[in-house]
Amino acid sequence: MLKLFFMTRSEENYLKAIFHLARKGNKAVTTSAIAEQMDTKPSSVTDMVKRLAEKGMINYRKYQGVSLTKEGRKAALSIIRKHRLWEVFLVEKMDFAWDEVHEVAEQLEHIKSEKLIDQLDKLLGFPRYDPHGDLIPSKDGEFDETAKRLLTEIPLKSTGVCVGVRDSSVPFLKFLDKNNIALGDEITVLDKEEFDGSLHIQIGDRSMHISDQIASNLYVKLKE
Amino acid sequence: MLKLFFMTRSEENYLKAIFHLARKGNKAVTTSAIAEQMDTKPSSVTDMVKRLAEKGMINYRKYQGVSLTKEGRKAALSIIRKHRLWEVFLVEKMDFAWDEVHEVAEQLEHIKSEKLIDQLDKLLGFPRYDPHGDLIPSKDGEFDETAKRLLTEIPLKSTGVCVGVRDSSVPFLKFLDKNNIALGDEITVLDKEEFDGSLHIQIGDRSMHISDQIASNLYVKLKE
DNA sequence: ACAAATTTTTAGATTTGTCTAAAATATATT
DNA sequence: AATATATTTTAGACAAATCTAAAAATTTGT
Ligand SMILES: [Mn+2]
Ligand SMILES: [Mn+2]
Ligand SMILES: [Mn+2]
Ligand SMILES: [Mn+2]
C-alpha cells in the first residue's frame, strides 16, 4: 500500500540535494555532505533525515549516512524535472539569459500542479535538455544520463566520448577521417558561437572549430 | 527613510485579504473578518496584524481593527497584479479553463522575480484584465476600478452602468436608440457565446442578445 | 445605564525548521 | 591497541505560524 505524503518545500530541497550528492560516488550520502550542499548545520540535517526516513523517502541508519528509496528517487526526479522545464521556459519564452534562470527556477520547482507541468512541457515542445545541457527527467521518472547525445546538446566546458554518428553518409564519414575525428575520441566543448551555433572544441591535444552541421551529427557520451 | 522588509508568504496573503476586505466598506477591517477570509482563528490574526503593524504595512489599534498604510497597499497590489497576470498566462498560454486557474495562481503570486513579472506582462501583451474580468493593477500601483470599461471586458454576471460609447457614429447611435439602450441604463452580462463573442444581457427588465460588435463599443462602469 | 452577548486579546501549547553546545560514535594515527 | 581527531547525534533553545482556552474590552439590548 502506497501512502501519499505531502512534501514541504524544505523536504523537497533536501531530497534534491541527496539525489545530486548520490549521483557522484555510489556510497551512502553523509550528513556533513548534505549540510554543506544545503548550507546548513549537520544537526539540522540529522533532524531532517529522520523525518524523511519516517516518510519512507530515504534509508537512514545512525552514523551510516542515507540513500534514496524508490519513492525518494521518484520525488527528487520530479523536482529536478520541474526545475529544468522552468529553466527552459525562462530562456525560451521569457528572454532570460542562461545564467539568470537558476534562482527563479529554485522557486518555481515547488509549484504544485501536475497540469501546469504537463502544459509547460507541451508549450516548450517536450525538451530533453535544459539551458545548461542537463537532461530533463521524463514524466515517468526515466533518467538515463549515460545515454548518448548529440555534441550540440552537451553543456559548455563538458567533455564527451565520441560514440557514434547520426549521419553515416560517405561525405560525412570522409570529413571525420580527414579531420582525425574518430569514435573513442574525447571532445570538450570550449565555446559556442551564438551566431551560427558552431563550436570551438578540444579534441585530444588539439583544438578546432566545427560547424553546427558537423556537431549535430556526432553522438557523444558525457564523461564522469 | 524607507526600509525594505522581506514579506513571508503568509504576510503577503494577509495583506491581500485585508486589501480585498477594505475595498468593500470603507471602515477599518475587523479581526474576525480577516479570520473568516483567511480561514483561521481570530487569535492568529491578532498575532499577525501585530507583525504587519511592526513592519509598517498596516495601521493597528487594539480592538479598533486595521487599515493598510501606503506601503501595505502597494505590497497588496503587487501580489494581486502577479496573481492576475499568472491567471491570464494560464488561460492564454497553458490551455487552462478560467475556473481552474485560481489555485495555481495562489502559489505563483508569491514567486519573487521582478524580471519574470515584467516579461510575463510583455509576453501576454500587457493585459488590463484577468480571465474573470478583474482589473490588473499596473506596475506602479495604479488601480482605478471605477474607470469605465468596455462591456466586453466585464465579468460574467456582473452589472455595469452604461456611461459612454466608443463608436459615436450615426448608425451605432441609431441602433442604440432603436433598441432602447441609453446612457444610465444598467446592464448585466448573463452569458457569453464562445463562438462569436456575442453577449446575452439583462437591460432593465428585459433581456436581449447583442453582437460582440455592439458590446465592444459600449462603455460601462461596474456597479458596487 | 447596566447586564448580556459578542468580539478581541492574551497566555500558553504545538509544529516546522533552524541553531549552538555538548555527548556519543566512528575513523585515523602512532 | 590505545589515543587523538573528525563526524554525527542529542539536548535544549529559538522564531514563525498556528491552535485552544481564558481574560479583557467592546457592543448590544432593555
Ligand atoms: Mn538550475
Ligand atoms: Mn540547469
Ligand atoms: Mn484568482
Ligand atoms: Mn481572477
Image: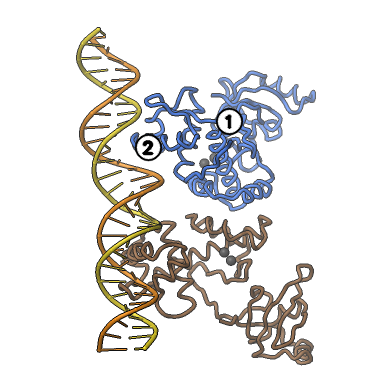
Chain colours: A blue, B brown, C orange, D yellow
Q: Mark 1, chain letter?
A: A
Q: Quadrant of the N terminus of chain A?
A: top right
What's the residue at 74%, 28% (across, down)? A166
Query: Helix or strand or loop: what does disc 2 sit on?
Result: helix
- What residue would you read off at disc 1? A189
Q: Mark 2, chain letter?
A: A
- What residue would you read off at disc 2? A47
The yes-or-no answer for disc 2 within 8 Å of ligand 1 is no
What's the residue at 38%, 39% (across, down)? A39
Instruction: Identify the image quadrant of residue A215.
Output: top right
* Left or right of B113, for residue A2: right
How packed mark 2 is, by other alpha carbons closer than 10 Å (few <14, some 14-19, many 20 or more), is few
Residue B29 in percent (x, y) is at 41, 74
Q: Nearer the viewer, mark 1 or mark 2?
A: 2
Q: Earlier in the sequence, mark 1 or mark 2?
A: 2
Q: How many marks?
A: 2
Q: Is residue A204 above or below residue A41?
A: above
- The Cα–Cα distance between marks 1 and 2, rounded to whole angstroms, is 42 Å
Query: Helix or strand or loop: what does disc 1 sit on?
Result: strand
**Is residue A120 or residue A60 the one in the foreground?**
A60
Q: Is residue A154 above or below residue B11?
A: above
Instruction: Identify the image quadrant of residue B95.
Output: bottom right
**Amino acid type shown at disc 1:** Val
Mark drawn on residue A52: none
How packed mark 1 is, by other alpha carbons closer than 10 Å (few <14, some 14-19, many 20 or more), is many
Residue A13 in percent (x, y) is at 47, 41
**Is residue B84 or residue C14 the one in the foreground?**
C14
Ligand 3: image quarter: bottom right
What's the residue at 61%, 36% (across, down)? A137
What's the residue at 72%, 89% (across, down)? B181
**Amino acid type shown at disc 2:** Asp
